[in-house]
């Protein structure tokens, strides 16, 4: 569906003079290209550009939403997008469910990763509650978009309904007040639970809105018991260190002007809270307490990301520890100088006055311009997944660059740039009866929800 050249056009010479709107459009198109260029014939989406990458069920959900944005932007036709959506829905509808070792899922949930050939559990990964909800969010977004009185679009809506209705959210409570992170057939439920301020806000909303297995409001309220209200750099906010926590639920949920009981006590909503978190990110980079190279007002975006480690190096007389994948965060860390440009861009709806200059600085620093067909992992589909200018590299390299890109990077960037531009995904989910029921069931009220 795409004939884009291997080289990324995000280079200074080709973007100089572009308006902000044109620049955001170009970056969104480049991020979108990840999906048609990596997608399998089945419509499933690889987790990353790493060779032999498994399918990511979260990536599938994001890919369905990216296709909708692609239709809106003229990057593919409605028919092409619908064909992809139907193939995916039919596949998940007929994929085997059960407690055995060789299935795709159990009780409506799906394994974090699926084998690209068999569409069943990859390795010994967990049945993932959070990744399942990102998949279901994609199903429901497409349910709202494909609304015509047409046989194929009707089938699309019916399949989305059926797949959502069979998810047994109550089972995932595992006998406790909050939802479990997941389940493995070998050992049962994981010990970790979704409590405190996390990306699971979306999980609780869709679990609360279920017409078949809804969880009680007390479950959502129990998840907020570990919330932490704090003051950082003059900003009062609900704290979470990694930037993606403030962003991911709002790829789908329009939380402007609506609040749950916990945030109502503090007089703000999650959208404003995410704006304050974005301001904290930039202020931290400007202050740069750990003295990393390149940190500044237009070089930030610290979140869960790939990294150059694990290793320890002495850099300019200072011993530095570097990690590989890590849930990096500010201001309390962990932080090793690794920045994820996509995470900065995904804050565009919250603080465009900070993000737009940051996009231009990333381009000026050639974060994305180096990718070509000879590079490990292929082209970067826009910006690199993550970079680190403090990590010691060879003489011909200005910084460490992640050799791969990820569906979970590109998808949120595509969705949030569109929400910034038109509010498309927000608008679709506001019209979803399940989402409205879930928000109200969790105690949200205000603005458009009332």
Image: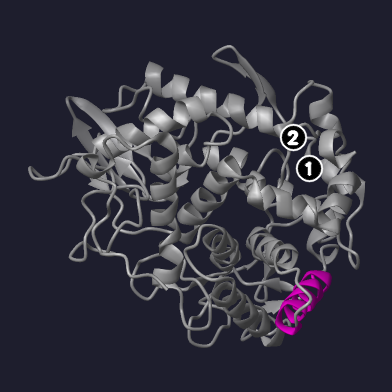
Q: Secondary structure at mark 1?
A: helix
Q: Position of residue 137 (x, y in %)?
A: 69, 60
Q: Nearer the viewer, residue 412 or 190?
A: 412
Q: Tell whether 384 sits left or right of 261.
A: left
Q: Quadrant of the C terminus?
A: top right
Q: Is residue 227 above or below residue 195?
A: above
Residue under label 1, please give it. Answer: 223
Question: In the rendered image, which quarter is residue 140 located in?
Answer: bottom right
Residue shown at 85% from the left, 50% from the top: 436
Q: Are marks 2 and 1 in contact (CB under 8 Å)?
A: yes
| Prevailing SS of the magenta stretch | helix
Q: Nearer the viewer, residue 161 or 55?
A: 161
Badge 1 local density, few (<14 within 10 Å), some, or many (20+)? many
Q: Nearer the viewer, residue 259 or 213?
A: 259
Q: Quadrant of the N terminus?
A: bottom left
Q: Position of residue 282 (x, y in %)?
A: 45, 24
Residue under label 2, please give it. Answer: 226
Q: Tell whether 91 sits left or right of 22.
A: right
Q: Is residue 246 above or below residue 34?
A: above
Q: Position of residue 276 (x, y in %)?
A: 60, 24
Magenta stretch, residue numbers? 151-167
Residue shown at 46% from the left, 40% from the top: 345
Q: Is 207 contained in the magenta span?
A: no
Residue shown at 60% from the left, 61% from the top: 65
Q: Tell whether 242 sits left or right of 24.
A: right
What is the distance, in whole Å, between disc 2 and disc 1 at their CAs? 7 Å
Visible in this render: residue 440? Answer: yes
Q: Is residue 23 above or below residue 438?
A: above
Q: Secondary structure at mark 2?
A: loop
Q: Is 160 contained in the magenta span?
A: yes
């Amino acid at each position: 569906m795409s004939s884009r050249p291997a080289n990324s056009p995000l280079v200074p010479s080709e973007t100089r003079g572009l308006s902000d709107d044109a620049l955001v459009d170009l970056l969104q198109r480049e991020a979108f290209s990840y999906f048609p260029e990596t997608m399998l014939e089945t419509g499933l989406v690889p987790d990353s550009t790493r060779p032999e990458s498994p399918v990511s069920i979260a990536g599938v959900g994001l890919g369905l939403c990216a296709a909708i944005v692609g239709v809106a932007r003229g990057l593919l036709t409605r028919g092409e997008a619908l064909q992809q959506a139907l193939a995916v829905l039919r596949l998940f509808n007929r994929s085997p469910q059960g407690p055995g070792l060789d299935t795709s899922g159990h009780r409506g949930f799906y394994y974090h990763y699926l084998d690209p050939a068999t569409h069943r559990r990859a390795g010994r990964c967990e049945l993932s509650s959070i990744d399942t909800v990102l998949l279901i969010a994609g199903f429901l977004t497409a349910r709202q978009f494909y609304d015509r009185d047409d046989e194929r679009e009707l089938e699309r809506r019916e399949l989305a309904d059926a797949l959502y209705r069979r998810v047994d959210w109550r089972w995932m409570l595992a006998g406790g007040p909050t939802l479990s992170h997941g389940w493995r057939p070998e050992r049962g439920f994981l010990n970790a639970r979704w409590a405190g301020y996390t990306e699971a806000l979306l999980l609780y909303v869709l679990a609360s809105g279920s017409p078949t297995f809804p969880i009680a409001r007390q479950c959502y309220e129990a998840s907020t018991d570990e919330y932490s209200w704090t003051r950082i750099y003059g900003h009062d906010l609900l704290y979470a260190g990694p930037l993606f926590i403030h962003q991911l639920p709002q790829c789908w949920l329009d939380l402007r002007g609506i609040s749950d009981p916990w945030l109502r006590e503090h007089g703000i909503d999650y959208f404003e809270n995410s704006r304050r978190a974005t301001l904290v990110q930039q202020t931290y980079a400007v202050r740069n307490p750990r003295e990393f190279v390149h940190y500044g007002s237009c070089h930030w975006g610290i979140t869960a990301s790939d990294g150059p480690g694990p290793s320890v190096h002495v850099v300019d007389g200072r011993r530095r520890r570097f990690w590989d994948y890590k849930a990096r965060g500010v201001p309390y860390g962990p932080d090793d100088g690794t920045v994820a440009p996509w995470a900065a861009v995904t804050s565009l709806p919250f603080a465009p006055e900070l993000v737009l200059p940051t996009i231009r600085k990333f381009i000026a620093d050639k974060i994305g311009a180096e990718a070509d067909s000879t590079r490990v992992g292929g082209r970067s589909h826009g910006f690199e997944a993550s970079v680190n200018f403090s990590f010691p590299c060879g003489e011909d390299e200005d910084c460490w660059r992640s050799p791969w890109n990820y569906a979970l990077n590109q998808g949120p960037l595509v969705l949030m740039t569109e929400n910034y531009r038109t509010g498309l995904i927000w608008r679709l989910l506001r019209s979803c009866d399940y989402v409205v029921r879930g928000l109200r069931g969790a105690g949200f009220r205000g603005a458009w929800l009332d």
